[in-house]
Amino acid sequence: MGKDKLKSRNIMTRDDLVAYLETVLAGLRQGTLILDNEERPLILRPSDSIEAELEIKQKSDKEKLELKLSWVPNKMQPLTPVATQLEAPVLPSSPLGDEAKKK
């Protein structure tokens, strides 16, 4: 399989971010994350073993939390988009669509 990449940076409300992260969590629970890319969807199949890296920074004028997750794809999870789209939540490539302010 080739290398696909999707990178997005957006400004959103805290409530919108919570809703987006809840969709990510639902996908992690189900074992399939579908990211709606403009070209074609990216389907991620997280395994039971996930490496999590957390970095927190606090300055007087800015606070930052970075969460990075990585895993070896679960080969037992089917990769067929039709089957997985019926069950897995779909994450838009830009959490707020056209309303998002990109940095």
Image (cartoon, helix red, strand yellow):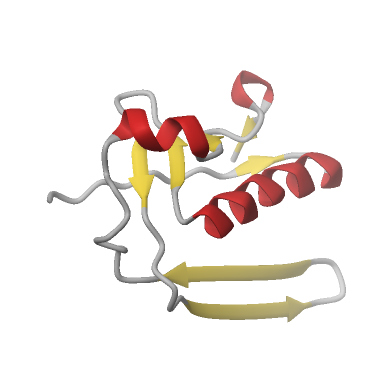
Residue 13, image x and y in percent?
82, 40
Name the side, left or right, on which 54 lies relative to 87: right
Q: Quadrant of the C terminus?
A: top right
- Is residue 13 or residue 85 the one in the foreground? 85
Q: Which residue is found at the position 51% from the left and 40% from the top?
A: 88
Q: Toward the viewer: 4 or 1?
A: 1
Residue 96 in view of the camera: yes
Is residue 41 visible from the viewing direction of this image?
no
Which residue corresponds to the image point at 85% horizontal and 43% vertical from the top-left?
Answer: 15
Q: Quadrant of residue 29?
A: bottom right
Residue at 31% across, 47% down? 5
Q: What x and y, as percent, mark residue 12?
A: 75, 39
Question: Where is 71 relative to 11, above or below?
Answer: below
Quarter location, residue 59:
bottom right
Task: Work out whether residue 38 or residue 83 is closer to the camera in this orientation and state it.
Answer: 83
Total tally of numbered discs in the picture = 0
Specify the farthest residue to the left. Answer: 1
Q: Nearer the viewer, residue 63 or 19?
A: 19
Seen in the image, is 18 located left or right of residue 6? Answer: right
| Image position, residue 43 (x, y; %) | 35, 44
Instruction: Judge left or right: residue 44 versus residue 76.
Output: right
Compared with 21, 34 (above or below) is above
Where's residue 7, x and y in %? 43, 46
* Image point (37%, 71%), residue name: 71
